[in-house]
Amino acid sequence: DVKVTQSSRYLVKRTGEKVFLECVQDMDHENMFWYRQDPGLGLRLIYFSYDVKMKEKGDIPEGYSVSREKKERFSLILESASTNQTSMYLCASSSPDREKLFFGSGTQLSVL
Amino acid sequence: GEDVEQSLFLSVREGDSSVINCTYTDSSSTYLYWYKQEPGAGLQLLTYIFSNMDMKQDQRLTVLLNKKDKHLSLRIADTQTGDSAIYFCAEKPGGSYIPTFGRGTSLIVHP
């Protein structure tokens, strides 16, 4: 089975802090994604990466950056956390045929 | 742009059938998906259908696709309390990396 692992289940940070959310997949998938999930808004794509060191902006990239130095790891960075970035963050990778997405368990981030 | 619409809530009695509906606008959609999210967890792929099919059945789950009306439905037979979750509809054109998700339907199953 594909495993997508997010390093933290819950995180609490202060306004202005730099925050790193880590995601690792074990199936050698090329494509990886970061979404945020908010009640009533569903999933919104922040960034995705289709190869090492390659990234593309999604629908809501403002306030975020990403890093993909190794194929298995995709990091989401909040350069200066703000309260409106309090959310559930979901990482995903897609199968080589791009047919299916596999999600991690999510990181619930609270910015105080 | 592309849009996927689904109602936000559905409440059913245990043992009844549940039908969750979804409409989409992108006529180039090739793949149509149903994902399930249990409380506190990520999304799990439940089932998916190609646009050249009109029905897919997998145990208690039946997916129906009306391509002309761009309408997708998920029927869960004999709904159980363990089926309580958020169900997301999604669509993706064949050449695209990225599916478009609906906002999710919260299914509440009560005794």
Image (spheres, grey):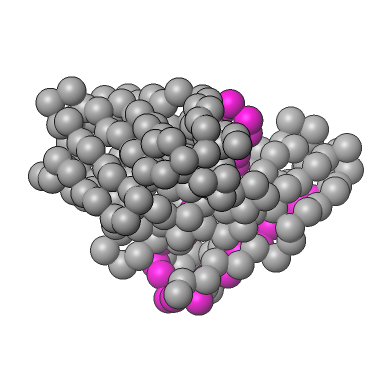
The dominant secondary structure in magenta is strand
Q: Is residue A48 above or below residue A1?
A: above
Give the x, y percent position of residue B77: 37, 43
Of residues A83 and B101, the one drawn nearer to the viewer in this rendering: B101
Give the x, y percent position of residue A47: 51, 47
User: To which quarter of the image does residue A54 belong?
Assistant: bottom left
* Residue at 67 percent of width and 50 percent of height: B40
Q: Is residue B99 magenta?
A: no
Q: Is residue A71 above or below residue B78?
A: below
* Residue at 21 percent of width and 27 percent of height: B70
* Residue at 50 percent of width and 76 percent of height: A26
Q: Is residue A39 magenta?
A: yes
User: To which quarter of the image does residue A23 belong?
Assistant: bottom right
Q: Is residue A44 left or right of residue B74?
A: right
Give the x, y percent position of residue B34: 38, 45
Q: Is residue B64 visible?
A: yes
Q: Is residue B67 above or below residue A109?
A: above
Q: Is residue B22 above or below residue A46?
A: above
Q: Is residue B47 left or right of residue A78?
A: left
The residues colored magenta run A18-45
Of residues B34 and A70, the one drawn nearer to the viewer in this rendering: B34
* Residue at 10 percent of width and 44 percent of height: B52
User: To which quarter of the image does residue B85 belong?
Assistant: top right
Q: Is residue A49 visible?
A: no
Q: Which quadrant of the figure contains the C terminus of chain A?
A: top right
Of residues A107 and A75, the one drawn nearer to the viewer in this rendering: A107
